[in-house]
Image: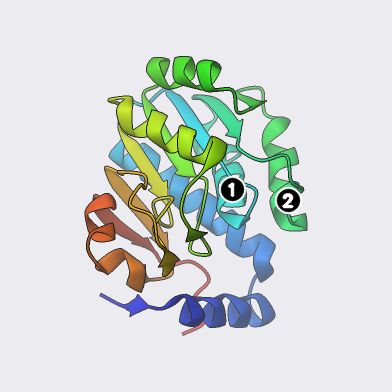
Amino acid sequence: MRVLSNAQIREVENETARSGPGFAGMMADAGHACAEHIVSEYPDAYRIVFLCGSGRNGGDAYACACDGLLGSRSISLIRLSRKPYDEVSSFFRAKALKKSNCTELFFDRDETARLLAESDLIADAVFGIGFRGVLSGDELDAVRLANSSGKPVFAIDVPSGVGENATGAEKVRADSTLTMIAVKRSMTEKPASRACGNVFVAHIGETS
């Protein structure tokens, strides 16, 4: 099992973007890998709620939501931030919102609680490896709602709240995590390792 630091992951990503499919191609690959994971590990999950942050982790969620493998499933995309997305993430968000099975709404605690209660699967894409400090505000509310929902939770790349520079105790408690390229060092350290559930690796955009 290959374990890399954040800095090493960024090096791989940047090299792949230069010599391979670029960041758009990598995000499409990540989204497809997530869709494959859902179909394989949660075949009966018809109603899926994605908790989406404003970074590339959220972009991976939008890329997953618009993947053809999930075309028969009902998808709710809960946006946790009104900040602008990067260009690639914005592209996949726009593509997802054109799909008839996808609906987006800004985070509202009561509405989110209702959707999570009615869901078959929660996909966590609030924060990726760049997370720092402690969860707070709407992001903390969303994580608490997911953890208390009683529904299976799938984390994209890392559970939100896990990271080399994370200092808080609260984080998503995932049943499974599909991490991109390699296992992140922060995922192997307690107590964060207990939040990851079953860990799978998507070998996207590798140059070697």
Name the spot of residue 158 as percent of width and height, x first: 40, 56
Q: What residue lies at 52% left-to-right and 37% top-to-bottom? A: 51
User: In terms of depth relative to the viewer, which is nearer, 188 or 90?
Assistant: 188
Kindly state the secondary structure of the residue where label 1 is placed.
Answer: helix
| Residue on which the image places disc 2 | 85
How many tags in the picture?
A: 2
Q: What residue lies at 58% left-to-right and 31% top-to-bottom? A: 78
- Within 10 Å of disc 1 (Cα), the crowding (few <14, some 14-19, many 20+) is many
Q: Can the viewer see residue 184?
A: no
Q: Can the viewer see residue 63?
A: yes
User: In terms of depth relative to the viewer, which is nearer, 80 or 36?
Assistant: 80
Type of the residue with mark 2: Tyr
Q: Looking at the picture, does residue 149 appear above or below residue 18?
A: above
Kindly state the secondary structure of the residue where label 2 is placed.
Answer: loop
Name the spot of residue 121 as percent of width and height, x first: 38, 29
Name the spot of residue 125 as percent of width and height, x first: 50, 46
Q: What residue lies at 51% left-to-right and 60% top-to-bottom? A: 131
Identify the image quadrant of the N terminus.
Answer: bottom left
The colour scheme used here is rainbow
Q: Is residue 27 left or right of residue 134?
A: right
User: In terms of depth relative to the viewer, which is nearer, 42 or 85?
Assistant: 85
Q: What residue lies at 51% left-to-right and 22% top-to-bottom? A: 112
Disc marking residue 58: 1
The answer to which quarter of the image holds residue 151 is top left
Q: Is residue 187 left or right of residue 111?
A: left
- Within 10 Å of disc 2 (Cα), the crowding (few <14, some 14-19, many 20+) is some
Looking at the image, do the residues carrying marks 2 and 1 touch, with CB atoms under 8 Å apart? Answer: yes
Disc marking residue 202: none
Type of the residue with mark 1: Gly
Disc 2 from disc 1: Cα separation: 9 Å
Name the spot of residue 71 as percent of width and height, x first: 55, 29
Upstream in the sequence, badge 2 or badge 1?
A: 1
